[in-house]
Image: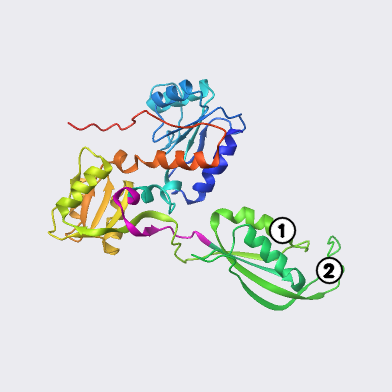
Amino acid sequence: MIVQDVITHLETLAPLPYAESFDNVGLLVGDKTKALTGVLVTLDTLEAVVDEAIAENCNLIVSFHPIIFKGLKKITGKSYVERVVLKAIKHDIAIYAIHTALDNMFEGVNARICDTLGLKHRKILIPQNETIKKLTTYAPVAEAEAIRTALFKAGAGSIGNYDECSFNVEGKGTFRGNEASTPTIGGKHVRHTEKETKITVTYNKHIEAKLLKHLFNAHSYEEVAYEVTTLENTNQHIGMGMVGELDKAMTETDFLKHLRDKIQTGCIRHSDFRQKKIKKVAVLGGSGSFAITAAKAAGADAFVTADLKYHDFFAAENAVFLADIGHYESEQYTKNLIVEYLTKKITNFAIILSKTNTNPVKYF
């Protein structure tokens, strides 16, 4: 195996087009064509983690957070970021970051928080915009079924719990080739009329290149007529945060105890008690203050996240109970998720869960 083989699996789990625009995801350091010796999975890539990779003979570190977030103008070892990059390059270790690409997956970071807290009937809290696209193409009637099948094979036509969805209309198409053309139907300089089927399918944006390749390979025309548009439809499986329900409603005090025990955090900062029971819970791993409004709009009784500032607690406005469990604590199970996924996909290499605690926050 090579490093790229692992990357292919990771980008099936969390396609990079769904990462937030501010993020820096993908292969950050190293050569993707190198032969793989082992994979170490971590939440953060620190020097101690690189040392652990060296000791474990792993030449690929899969990190949730990107060690390089802003551009580096110099790499002299003056900062912890520069030292990590230097050490990784020196020891020929690749670093891959998955971050918000995994955040936005239905079975990603927030699903693990829901699993830990026992939340059911889950939905995406903030669906990501412009993730669904539509392809319209035109094919000779005799080829329509083969082309539809090729598009479905590429992943098009999936809507919620249904697949192989398409809309088809028969009509007549006309075309005339010039001197440089080599038409498969008709001849040069002659207008040709062909009975055609208009085929329309929707698809998730990350498969577009693959979809068009399947279309061109299946179609007989020299010039394939097609249209691509971006839809405003809500994607129910991609986006930030989740909202779900506890089996039984809890008092706010009992809910905080539940949080503390399940998340195993040393501190929970919370808003004022509303004296209302908690049943519906919104969650968002990492810095989630931007989602307070969405949590209220979703009718959540509580919103569990991290990195809330002083004025963020005012934004609760007694409409939702806020609980800040800590950044590391909210994302701590992410590396377990990645290890479990890669272990199922790759059976001939050890996928190692980092033992290095990278939480920079300590509690007294």
When asked about the image quadrant of residue 149, the answer is bottom right
Question: How far apart in space, not on screen, are marks 1 and 2 (Cα)?
Answer: 16 Å
The verdict on residue 161 being magenta is no
Q: Where's residue 108, x and y in %?
A: 42, 49
- Residue displayed at 38% across by 29% down: 355
Segment tinted magenta in the rendering: 114-132
Name the residue at 49% across, 59% down: 131
**Horizontal placement of 218 versus 33: left or right?**
right
Residue 248 at x, y percent in the picture:
23, 59
Q: Position of residue 27 (x, y in %)?
A: 52, 37
Count residues near mark 1 (Cα–Cα under 10 Å), then give few for <14, some for 14-19, many for 20+.
some
**Mark 1 or 2, nearer chain start:** 2
Helix, strand or loop at mark 1: helix
Can residue 24 be seen?
A: no
The type of colouring in the image is: rainbow
State the image coordinates of residue 80 (x, y, percent, origin top left): 38, 26
